[in-house]
Image (cartoon, rainbow, N blue to C red):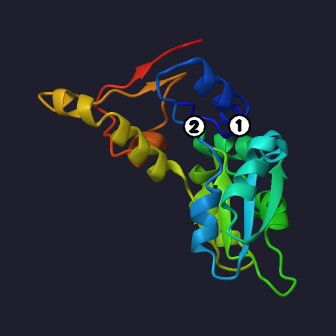
Amino acid sequence: MIACNTASTIALPELRKKFAVPFVGTVPAIKPACAASQTRRVAVLGTEATVKREYTRALIRDHGQGCEVDLVGSKQLATYAEAELRGEPVSDAALLAEIDPCFRDDGNRTDTVVLACTHYPLLIARLEQIAPWPVNFIDPAPAIARRVANLLEGVAAVAAKGATRAIFTSGTAPAAILTRFGIRAEQPVYSITP
């Protein structure tokens, strides 16, 4: 699994060409967002790199379902999510400045915002509070997890016999992340330091 929208939009096609093993990418959830939109106006909120990629534009062409899709590149939102995880609150004004371009109302009001960076769902409660009007924020993590589980179905039967859960991180996993995945602080988490 490639746990980054930008890395997925850059590397996924090449990896799938070169290797026979399946790769699950974290890519903007354009198809479900467009299917869910009632107003047919969707915003894709990602890093500047993700929204500039041809891969993202191809997803819109292939799965946009006639929706008007606005691509919004954020400069700071991932940094703000990391600050919040460290217990360093970010102001509502700073967050709103990053998401405000998602909200368009020119006859078709944006009703769905794709969170196209793995950091952004960590802020979803805050984003819902400060949004200029209610929208459906799409967190792709559950769909990605289902896809991985589907690919690992055969392996899961073997692992289910006395298996334990392990999470590997590139640093210390904050309690907020562990809680989000239903893991108590006393369960093992293995860190890999670069």
Residue 26, relative to residue 101: is it above or below? above
Residue 170, compared with residue 153, is above or below; it is above
> How many labels were placed on the picture?
2
Q: Amino acid at mark 2?
A: Gly
Disc 2 crowd, CA 10 A, few/some/many (<14, 14-19, 20+): many
Q: Identify the image quadrant of the C terminus.
A: top right
Judge by depth and name the residue closer to the eye, 22 or 75: 22
Q: Give how far across and how far down residue 19 sits, in percent.
A: 54, 18
Q: Is residue 96 left or right of residue 15?
A: right
Q: Residue furthest left?
A: 161
Provide residue 120's location: percent of width, then percent of height.
64, 50
Measured in 3D between alpha carbons, the distance from the residue under mark 1 to the one under mark 2, in whole angstroms, is 8 Å
What SS does tag 1 mark?
A: helix
Answer yes or no: is residue 93 visible. no
Residue at x 64%, y 71% (from the top left corner): 129
Residue receiving disc 2: 25
Q: Toward which corner of the image does residue 184 lie, by quadrant?
A: top left
Q: Which mark is residue 32?
A: none
Mark 2: which secondary structure? loop
* Residue 132, picture quadrant: bottom right
Which label number is shown at residue 9? 1
For the residue carrying disc 1, how many other residues have a C-alpha within 10 Å: few (<14), some (14-19), or many (20+)?
Answer: many
Q: Nearer the viewer, residue 14 or 131?
A: 14
Residue 17 rendering spot, x and y as whole percentages = 62, 24
Marks 1 and 2 in Cβ contact (< 8 Å): yes
From the viewer's perspective, is 27 left or right of 55? left
Residue 130 is situated, as x and y percent measured from the top left of the image, at: 70, 70
Three-letter code for the amino acid on which mark 1 is drawn: Thr
Q: Is residue 128 visible?
A: yes
Report the residue at 63% width, 35% height from top: 4
Residue 138's quadrant in the figure? bottom right
